[in-house]
């Protein structure tokens, strides 16, 4: 029970600390699934910094986060503490300009 509470605290801390956070399978340089690769591609095109957590290296987070987020799948994109969704939602928001707007409003350019 304590271990799960510690994992929940860790997740909440990660979400609070990072303006843009992607929970994904693998890393941005080496995504381990097509959905995570698509999420990284979309975020890379926006060109703003984002943090990530490789859930394959963090099985406790992988098991606990879906309960916190009420979202069963990965990747999961969080912006300013709010779950945005997975790669399909990210792609749709990117195509209509909403994702770029949201991320640019909450981050600084990489070279700033």
Image (cartoon, helix red, strand yellow):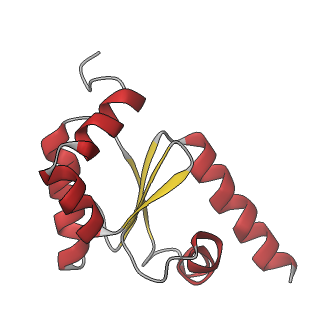
Compared to residue 19, the image places residue 109 above or below, namely above
Q: Position of residue 33 (x, y in %)?
A: 22, 79
* Residue ranking furthest to the front: 96
Q: Nearer the viewer, residue 67 or 54?
A: 67
For this view, does 17 lie left or right of residue 97?
right
Q: Nearer the viewer, residue 49 or 78?
A: 78
Q: Position of residue 107 (x, y in %)?
A: 38, 29
Instruction: Report whether residue 29 is seen.
Output: no
Q: Position of residue 25 (x, y in %)?
A: 34, 74
Q: At 26% across and 44% down in the image, what residue appears?
A: 98
Q: Nearer the viewer, residue 94 or 39?
A: 94
For this view, does 95 lie left or right of residue 26?
left
Q: At 59% across and 52% down in the image, what residue appears?
A: 14
User: Residue 49 sits in which quadrant?
Assistant: top left
Q: Position of residue 80 (x, y in %)?
A: 52, 42
User: Residue 22 sits in which quadrant?
Assistant: bottom left
* Residue ranking furthest to the top: 112
Q: Quadrant of the C terminus?
A: top left
Q: How many marks?
A: 0
User: Residue 38 sits in which quadrant?
Assistant: bottom left
Instruction: Report whether residue 27 is seen.
Output: yes
Compared to residue 83, the image places residue 49 above or below, namely above
Q: At 23% across and 49% down in the image, what residue appears?
A: 43
Q: Quadrant of the N terminus?
A: bottom right
Q: At 24% across and 54% down in the image, what residue appears?
A: 93
């Amino acid at each position: 029970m304590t271990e799960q509470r510690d994992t929940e605290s860790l997740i909440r801390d990660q979400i609070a600390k990072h303006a843009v956070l992607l929970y994904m399978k693998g890393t941005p340089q080496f995504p381990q699934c097509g959905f995570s690769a698509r999420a990284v591609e979309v975020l890379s095109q926006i060109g703003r910094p984002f943090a990530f957590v490789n859930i394959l290296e963090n099985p406790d987070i992988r098991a606990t986060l879906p309960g916190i987020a009420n979202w069963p799948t990965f990747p999961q994109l969080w912006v300013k503490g709010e779950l945005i969704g997975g790669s399909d939602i990210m792609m749709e928001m990117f195509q209509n300009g909403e994702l770029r707007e949201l991320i640019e409003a909450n981050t600084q350019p990489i070279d700033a």
